[in-house]
Image: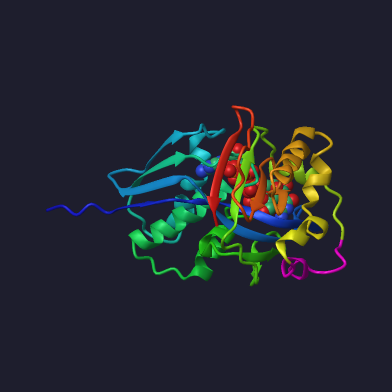
Amino acid sequence: MIKTISMLDFPNAKINLGLLVTEKRPDGFHNLESCFYPMGWCDALEIVQADELTFTMSGLPVPGNPDSNLCLKAYKLLQQGFQLPPVHMHLHKVIPMGAGLGGGSSDAAFTLKQLNSLFELNLTPEKLEDYARQLGSDCAFFIRNEPVVAVEKGDVFKPTSVNLDGYTCVLVYPGIHITTAEAYGNIVPKKPSCGIEMFLKQDVGVWKEVLKNDFEEALFPSYPELAGIKQQLYNAGADYASMTGSGSTIYGLFKKEPANLVFPGHYLLWKGLL
Ligand SMILES: C[C@](O)(CO)[C@H](O)COP(=O)(O)OP(=O)(O)OC[C@H]1O[C@@H](n2ccc(N)nc2=O)[C@H](O)[C@@H]1O
Ligand SMILES: Nc1ncnc2c1ncn2[C@@H]1O[C@H](COP(=O)(O)OP(=O)(O)OP(=O)(O)O)[C@@H](O)[C@H]1O
């Protein structure tokens, strides 16, 4: 009997709990401080050993040439160090893009992790993070995929005490595609007076006053719809609401699941327990 080598996994999204852009770096990127928290809104990625390297997609259309998809980039990066057999990869895209949810970064990190398992490359999480950093600033987080405070480019991690067990999170994507580079271009970095972990230790109900995403101030004037969604989540009883990453998704954290949340039909919504 021929053994088929294959693996199906579900790259998930993240949200940012607070996001301070602290300074511009000499390499053109920005240092930041933010808590990254995994979310259950997922793509699906199947990798099967095959006669030649192929890549197909279904679900939401991904802008750009499929040859530049992060799944293929991740495969090609690992191939430089290992004699990887050819594979067929199929990505079913569910997580919206230009949404601040890190979906593409998660696909890249999961490709590395799945190839590591399938072909028994024995790469440690540290080594996988080194590969992931070469694919994008958000990618390394998805290797361990657990809540952390991220600093520098968003790819160096410190432990956090945050635990949102029992909360329901509502994610609202209004269909506004904001490119990350455009969003960073609108930011004036500022050094914070204290670290974000001090705010995260406080009750979620207090975060409204203290935990900010700097991209909101930069983007809300151009996209007033986003401030409207945030207000709607607070009106529905959210303990905390914010934009995630560089937008445009807005999330609300609810202790009690909200009823009667109505948004326009073209919005994409996800609701889940953390
Ligand atoms: C906004 C966040 O999602 C917060 O988690 C991330 O910082 C974005 O990370 P990402 O999408 O993985 O970004 P990358 O693909 O590495 O970079 C895209 C572009 O965003 C800008 N960029 C990104 C990350 C960073 N720390 N500083 C930056 O200035 C750069 O112009 C870069 O060319
Ligand atoms: N597998 C992929 N899934 C999504 N986008 C991809 C993928 N591969 C390459 N891309 C490109 O990356 C761009 C950004 O996608 P992504 O889902 O990471 O956005 P985002 O949620 O705004 O990310 P972030 O939170 O990191 O700012 C897309 O517009 C697309 O051109």
Query: What percent of the width, then of the height, locates residue 236?
Result: 69, 43
Give the residue drawn at x 64%, y 59%: 36
In this picture, is 112 found above or below 121? above
Q: Quadrant of residue 23?
A: bottom right
Horizontal relation, residue 181 to residue 61: left or right: right
In this picture, is 66 found above or below 147? above
Give the residue drawn at x 67%, y 55%: 16
The total number of labels drawn is 0
Reply yes or no: does residue 194 show up in magenta: yes
In this picture, is 223 found above or below 4? above
Give the residue drawn at x 60%, y 51%: 169
Residue 32: in sight, yes or no?
A: no
Quick one: 175 or 234, which is closer to the camera?
234
Furthest residue toward top = 265
Query: What percent of the width, then of the height, locates residue 224?
Result: 80, 34
Q: Quadrant of residue 150?
A: bottom right
Q: Quadrant of the C terminus?
A: bottom right
Furthest residue toward left = 1
Q: Which residues are magenta?
A: 191-202
